[in-house]
Amino acid sequence: SSMIIPFFLYFVLKDYNRPYAIAVAFLPLVVGVLREIQQRLEDIKVKGFFIGFPRSSAGVVLIAFVNTRLVANLHLYWLVLPMTLYLCYTQLSHTPYVGNDKPMLMKIPRMKFYLTTCIVLLIGLSIAGYFWEAVVVSMGFYLLSSHILIEKSVWDDIKRQVKALAVD
């Protein structure tokens, strides 16, 4: 699955600018390898959370982003590089993102409101003909969720683990 996104990005961008397409497509591949190395060297875990933005979620954001009207219809392909760089950064960060542990999900205050808002946005914008934009907005909420939904104790636990790694 780590090869699908680079091929997709290359295919979308190659007619715009082939060297640009190669560079942008190469980034998720390199970051995927770096993330794998990072996870093997750093044993940072918090039950119910992903540490760093999940690669599959970053792939969804990129696929949706290049299909938005902003990129696909207005041909603003240059915007794909900053989005890709930002997503690469989030994948290598120590930022906690809510995982897919259902009991843990429902313990987080405001989670039901957050999920309901995303579902309503997805449905509403999709009916209006803005499906890809709805996916980008919903995934944007997911990117921001670590700063909105996650309690300070989780952040403190991660900081403690990172600090312990630096000492070793």
Image (tube, rainbow, N blue to C red):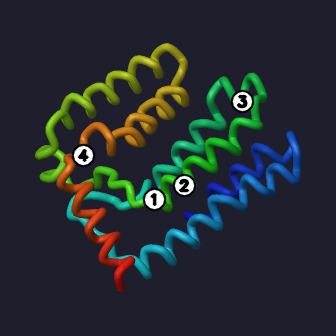
- Towards the viewer: 132 or 33: 33
The quarter holding residue 42 reads bottom left
The percent position of residue 19, horizontal first and vertical second, equals 87, 53
Give the left or right position of residue 65, taking residue 131 as reference.
Answer: right
Mark 3 and mark 1 in contact? Answer it, CB < 8 Å. no
Mark 3 and mark 4 in contact? Answer it, CB < 8 Å. no
In the image, what residue type sits under mark 3?
Ala
Distance, label 3 to label 1, CA atoms, is: 29 Å
Mark 2 vs mark 3, foreground winner is 2
Q: Which mark is residue 93?
A: 1
The N terminus sits in image quarter: bottom right
In the image, what residue type sits under mark 2?
Tyr
Distance, label 4 to label 2, CA atoms, is: 19 Å
- The residue wearing badge 4 is 150
- Towards the viewer: 128 or 80: 80
**N-term-proximal mark, 3 vs 1:** 3
At horizontal 43% and vertical 74% (from top left) the residue drawn is: 39
Give the left or right position of residue 14, taking residue 50 as reference.
Answer: right
**N-term-proximal mark, 3 vs 4:** 3
Distance, label 4 to label 1, CA atoms, is: 15 Å
- The residue wearing badge 3 is 72
At horizontal 35% and vertical 78% (from top left) the residue drawn is: 165
Up/down of 56 relative to 135, above or below: below
Q: Which mark is residue 89?
A: 2
